[in-house]
Image (cartoon, rainbow, N blue to C red):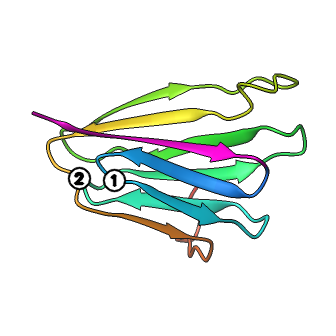
Amino acid sequence: MPATVTLRGYSDDLIDVSGAISEEWGTNDEPAVVAFSDGTAARIEFDGDGVWRIATLRVGPGSKVKHLPGVVGDDENYSDVLTVEAAELAWAVYGTDIAYASGAPR
């Protein structure tokens, strides 16, 4: 049976992972990356419109992702939601210090 996690933002300063892995991180108002043990990685940031935006950077081999967009001005749906389904999910890591290869998309 596959493992599933959901990534989303809460309030204006929390990032939440729930499902097979449960964790909550406080943010420092900078874009961050959340990476999962299956190889999936996503960028998350709270934008100027008051919505958490999530961009999939990489999907792990054999994994599936589903992205639901947040809505500007909607107090209930102010975060994109990313769901990751993988054969196994053992850990998630959160970070704000990111190094890019020359010419890599950001």
Q: Nearer the viewer, residue 88 or 25?
A: 25
Tell me if I can see residue 52 in this picture. yes
Q: On the picture, is 8 further left or further right than 45? A: left
Rendered position, 8 above or below 37: above
Q: What's the residue type where badge 1 is placed?
A: Ile
- Look at the image and give the residue range highlighted in magenta: 1-11
Q: Residue at x 69, y 27 (%)?
A: 70
Tell me if I can see residue 106 in this picture. no
Rendered position, 103 above or below 22: below
3 part of magenta stretch: yes
Percent coordinates x, y for residue 98 in the rendering? 58, 73
Percent coordinates x, y for residue 33 in the rendering? 55, 61
Q: Residue at x 58, y 64 (%)?
A: 25
Q: Where is the C terminus found, in terms of image quarters?
A: bottom right
Q: Which mark is residue 89?
A: 2
Q: On the picture, is 98 further left or further right than 28? A: left
Q: What's the residue type where badge 2 is placed?
A: Leu
Which of discs 2 and 1 lies nearer the camera? The answer is 1
Q: Which residue is mark 1?
A: 21
